[in-house]
Image (tube, rainbow, N blue to C red):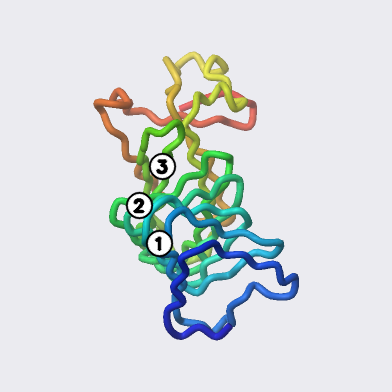
């Protein structure tokens, strides 16, 4: 499909064609998910030019999904579940939102291409167990070398996922038990990170800790 306009969808999206990701790579249009709860699925992933979330309910991935243009979350939750959502547009403004966010509760991930000396938003959160928690982070590039950066946000005690909070260096007093991030950089650029928390809900922690290659939390 060569999409130069808007394809407005009220139902689910499914691609079962093993030979194509649906859209011509020169497409500049958008697919608008404008229904209630909607699922993106199929035997083959779709490569959307631009994806816009509207309507009601949650939008959910049932397959790995690429976006070559922009992702407009507006006020919707996009549930990556156990799948990879890749935004392949290197612009720092490729993801926009009102109150919407991306959840990765089943170990899915948000992947972004970062390739300019700018700040990139990762609007991650969770509505697991019915309570919405928005905990984004930003990363700042120091150069214009292309990197891929992947992030998963998990609203669980790290110990329940194999990252024991008791396995820590002596100078680490405690490890936060409500959520954690899994971050992965494919590239060599230096990055600065800015994490956002709610001091009243989270406790106002001021020191980041990292799970190292020896399976220990350290500063």
Q: Is residue 137 visible?
A: yes
In this rendering, position of residue 181 left or right of residue 94? right
| Relative image position of residue 170 (x, y in whole percent) | 49, 14
Task: Using a 10 Å C-alpha cutoff, classify the residue at mark 1 as few (fewer than 14 neighbours), some (14 to 19) or many (20 or more).
Answer: many
Q: Mark 3 against mark 1, which lies toward the viewer?
A: 1
Q: Could you tell me how far apart the alpha carbons at marks 1 and 2 are, in whole angstroms?
A: 9 Å
The residue beneath circle 3 is 125
Q: Residue at x 71, y 62 (%)?
A: 43
Look at mark 1 in the image and give the residue it sits on: 53
The outermost residue toward the right is 18
Q: Is residue 3 above or below residue 176?
A: below
Label 3 SS: strand
Q: Nearer the viewer, mark 1 or mark 2?
A: 1
Relative horizontal placement of residue 204, taking residue 129 as reference (left or right): left
Quick one: label 1 or label 2, which is nearer the N terminus? 1
Instruction: From the top left corner, tell me how far across and down residue 98 is, in percent.
Output: 28, 56
Q: Identify the disc placed on residue 100.
A: 2
Is there CB contact under 8 Å for labels 3 and 1? no
Outermost residue to the left: 200
| Residue under the image location 62 percent in, 57 percent down | 64
The disc, 3 or 1, on the residue closer to the chain's N-terminal end is 1
Q: Tell me, for residue 210, which label it has, or none.
A: none
Callout 1–callout 2 Cβ contact below 8 Å: yes
Q: Position of residue 145 (x, y in %)?
A: 50, 65
């Amino acid at each position: 499909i060569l999409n130069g306009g808007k394809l407005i969808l009220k139902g689910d999206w499914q691609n079962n064609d093993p030979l194509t990701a649906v859209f011509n790579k020169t497409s500049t249009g958008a697919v608008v998910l404008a229904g209630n709860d909607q699922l993106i699925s199929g035997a083959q992933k779709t490569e959307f030019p631009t994806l816009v979330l509207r309507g009601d309910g949650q939008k959910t991935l049932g397959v790995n999904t690429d976006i070559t243009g922009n992702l407009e979350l507006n006020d919707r939750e996009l549930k990556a579940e156990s799948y990879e959502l890749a935004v392949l547009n290197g612009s720092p403004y490729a993801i926009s939102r009102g109150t919407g966010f991306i959840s990765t509760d089943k170990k899915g991930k948000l992947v972004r291409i970062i390739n300019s000396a700018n700040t990139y938003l990762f609007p991650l959160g969770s509505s697991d167990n019915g309570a919405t928690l928005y905990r984004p982070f930003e990363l700042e590039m120091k150069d214009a070398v292309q990197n891929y950066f992947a992030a998963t946000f998990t609203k669980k005690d790290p110990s329940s996922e194999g990252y024991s909070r008791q396995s820590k260096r002596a100078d680490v007093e405690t490890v936060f038990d409500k959520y954690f991030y899994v971050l992965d950089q494919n590239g060599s650029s230096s990055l600065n990170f800015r994490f956002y928390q709610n001091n009243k809900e989270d406790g106002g922690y001021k020191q980041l800790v990292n799970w190292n290659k020896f399976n220990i939390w350290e500063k």
